[in-house]
Image (tube, rainbow, N blue to C red):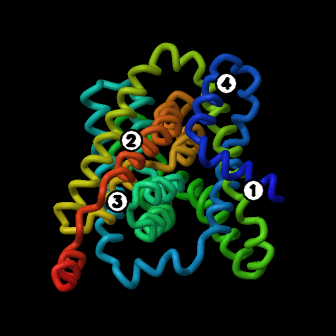
Amino acid sequence: MKTLEKLSTLAGKYFAILVILAAVIAFIFPSTFIVFGSYVTILLGIVMFGMGLTLKPIDFKLVFTNPFPVIVGIIAQYTIMPLIAFGLAYLLRLPAELAAGLVLLGSVPGGTASNVMVYLARGNVALSVAMTSLSTLLAPIMTPFLLYLLAGQWLPVDPVAMFMSIVQVILIPIILGLMIRRFFPVVVDKGVSVVPLISVVAILIIVSAVTAANAGNVVTAGFLVFIAVFLHNGLGLLVGYFVAKMMGLSENDRRAISIEVGMQNSGLGVTLATAHFSALAALPSVWGAIWHNISGPILATFWSNRQEPPTNKTVEKKVVNE
């Protein structure tokens, strides 16, 4: 078990590198990995099941004790990223499938890796976890609605079918995970440290499968899609931070909201694009899975090396002590 725990820690630490390696290998040897394409939905269900195992009632405490930052963050999550994706799709004149895929990437909830990034960035981890959890639970409603509203002009969107897909892939596995944690807490606590390793392996297989299916498309449209994802992510991080600042939130909250808004659940984007659109439409989410796990650590490192501005309470305490 200790060996698995060490592997789990290493997998989380070097996740970005592993994702890049998986994508490169799948691009070079697509025939080896394309067989996993039919398991993408199951693999994401496993990731969400792991998320359910790690969730605790305390993760939702902030929603009730201090809801304002959570509400600001959730609204920012489901407005900033979809609208930026919509605008970029027009400005870059993306082909229909790629445009719909970019909007899909912008319409999915925050990714679980964002919680780790917020921790490293010295942000409000409780706010990050609350945002991830709540945005994920809202995804069955918000993601199909946003896609129908913004992407329907490029590809036909069936919001009811997508709603059912998200319920099957996200809600049911999370609820199962929560129930198992509720009734078998001792067993779960003993094995929960291995969950990140299982999630990383599942995401690596998903990235490999979709990259293999898009091997030809990466050559013809890969650079354009990367530019779109790069701008989408960067603008999301920037606008998310300044929206939180405009709302008068603390520096800790700004960092959490910025990272939560900028880092999407790319695995869900890949799964929904593959199931409801095409392999090409999944390409923005594949690039998202790669780039978000590069930009996240870069931003987290930058913020971790910057001293947080003192709050009013800190200043008052310093004045009193002096």
Amino acid found under the numbered disc labelled 1: Glu
Q: Mark 4 or 2, which is nearer the eye? A: 4
Query: Which of the 4 quarters of the picture holds residue 231?
Result: top left
Helix, strand or loop status at disc 2: helix
Q: Earlier in the sequence, mark 1 or mark 2?
A: 1
Amino acid found under the numbered disc labelled 4: Ala
Disc marking residue 26: 4
The alpha-carbon separation of the residues under discs 1 and 3 comes to 29 Å
Q: Is residue 278 left or right of residue 91?
A: right
Q: Earlier in the sequence, mark 4 or mark 3?
A: 4
The 10 Å Cα crowd at callout 4, few under 14, some 14 to 19, many 20 or more, is many
Q: Nearer the viewer, mark 1 or mark 4?
A: 1
Which residue has dot 2 on it? 103
Q: Are marks 1 and 3 in contact (CB under 8 Å)?
A: no
Measured as percent of width and height from the top left, residue 103 is found at 38, 41
Q: Is residue 122 above or below residue 232?
A: below
Q: Residue at x 52, y 57 (%)?
A: 163
The amino acid type, in three-letter code, at marker 2 is Val
Residue at 73% x, 42% y is: 39
Residue type, numbered disc 3: Ile
Q: Which residue is mark 3?
A: 257
Q: Are marks 4 and 3 in contact (CB under 8 Å)?
A: no
Residue that badge 1 annotates: 5
